[in-house]
């Protein structure tokens, strides 16, 4: 699976996901400080699932029409260990009962909720 780790996604988690065999592009490594819109365009162009802690992504999807086909995983967990986001992402991707494509998946400490946009 192809993932796009937003700038706020920890490097330790990026490394873990890569070790698990995921194709992960990291904004922090490749193009730090680009706009959220530019990040969404990369996700769309490269068919990557976006991993982020940024709340603005829901607005980009539902108000501004940025709709990456492979989905967005928005983590609202805090505080966290730098490897915890990788564990969450891997669990979500591995879950047979969860579809990520065309979905905004919001993860909190209590639950996972999804909203379809495609």
Image (cartoon, grey):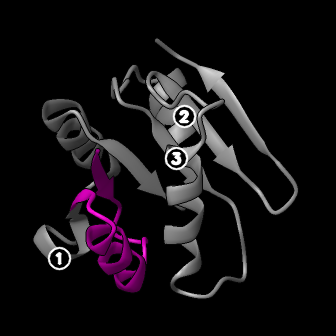
Q: Which residue is mark 3?
A: 94
First along the sequence among labels 2 and 1: 1
Numbered mark located on residue 59 in the image: 2
- Residue occupying the point 54% across, 62% down: 53
| Marks 2/3: CA–CA distance | 27 Å
Q: Is residue 33 visible?
A: no
Residue farthest along the right direction in this orientation: 110
Dot 3, crowdedness within 10 Å: few (<14), some or many (≥20)?
few
- Residue occupying the point 27% across, 57% down: 22
Residue 109, position as x, y percentages in the image: 81, 63
Q: Is residue 7 magenta?
A: yes
Question: Taking 59 as reference, is 2 above or below it?
Answer: below
Check the picture and name the quadrant holding the N terminus.
top left
Callout in the foreground (1, 3): 3
Q: Secondary structure at mark 2?
A: helix
Residue 74, position as x, y percentages in the image: 57, 50
Residue 59, position as x, y percentages in the image: 54, 34
Residue farthest along the top direction in this orientation: 118
- Residue occupying the point 44% across, 25% down: 101
Q: Which residue is mark 1?
A: 29
First along the sequence among labels 2 and 3: 2
Callout in the foreground (2, 1): 1
- Residue occupying the point 37% across, 77% down: 16
Q: Secondary structure at mark 3?
A: helix
Report the span colored magenta: 1-24
């Amino acid at each position: 699976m192809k993932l796009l780790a937003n700038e706020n996604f920890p490097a330790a988690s990026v490394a873990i996901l890569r070790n698990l065999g995921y194709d992960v592009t990291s904004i922090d490594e490749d193009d730090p400080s680009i706009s959220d819109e530019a990040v969404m365009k990369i996700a769309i162009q490269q068919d990557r699932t976006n991993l982020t802690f940024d709340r603005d992504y829901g607005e980009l999807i539902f108000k501004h029409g940025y709709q990456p086909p492979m989905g967005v995983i928005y983590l609202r967990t805090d505080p966290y260990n730098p490897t915890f986001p990788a564990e969450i992402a891997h669990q979500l991707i591995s879950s047979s009962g969860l579809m990520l494509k065309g979905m905004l998946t919001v993860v909190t400490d209590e639950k996972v909720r999804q909203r379809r946009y495609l």
